[in-house]
Image (tube, rainbow, N blue to C red):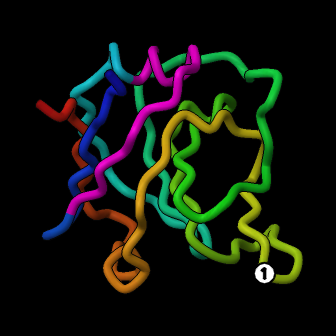
Amino acid sequence: MLKKCKIQVKDFQLIVTLRQTSTAEEIWKALPIKSTVNTWGDEVYFFTSVDALVEDDANDIINLGEIAYWPSGKAIAIGFGKTPASIDKEIRLADKCNIWGDCNIDLEKIKTIKSGDKIFVEKCQ
């Protein structure tokens, strides 16, 4: 059975299906996570206690709905549009990141998230 977690921020949540990777397992073991949101263009990221290594397939360009872990920042990143590093319409993160989960992103809601918002990640029952 696939593992799922819930990312709660403001009045909405994202249900993330975890991939079968070592980073996903490290994040799963660290749950629940409470943090504070930072933004960088159309990217939301938040710091964690997770300390995962860069995986072989890490990438700085992601697809909408992919949930990433930024190893050098020890942060979870959710890209949903252009960042200061993007070229054209790509979703480019600041550095190579491990993709550890997938979800459906409601662009209207995620665009309301601001730096300083509280964020909570927990296992789904």
Image quadrant in which the N terminus is located = top left
For the C terminus, give its image quadrant: top left
Residue drawn at x 36%, y 27% is: 2
Task: Indicate yes or no whether the magenta region holds residue 21.
Answer: yes
Foreground residue among 111 and 4: 4
Residue occupying the far front of the picture: 1
Query: Height in image: 18 above or below 119?
Result: above
Instruction: Give amino acid for label 1.
Output: Lys
As displayed, is residue 74 above or below residue 82? above
Tally of numbered discs: 1
The residue located at (79%, 42%) in the rendering is 59
How many C-alpha atoms fall within 10 Å of the one at disc 1: few (<14), some, or many (≥20)? few
Residue at 61 percent of width and 36 percent of height: 73
- Give the left or right position of residue 85, taking residue 30 as reference: right
Residue 12 vs residue 85, the one in the foreground = 12
| Residues rendered magenta in the picture | 13-27
Whole-percent x, y for residue 90 in the image: 78, 72
30 is higher (above) or lower (below) than 69: above
Tell me where residue 83 appears, x and y as whole percent.
70, 72
Q: Viewed as shown, does residue 28 lie left or right of 45? A: left
- Disc 1 element: loop
20 falls in the magenta region: yes
**Among the 4 quarters of the image, the one containing residue 13:** bottom left
The residue singled out by tag 1 in the image is 89
Q: Is residue 1 left or right of residue 58?
A: left
> Which x, y percent locates residue 24?
48, 24
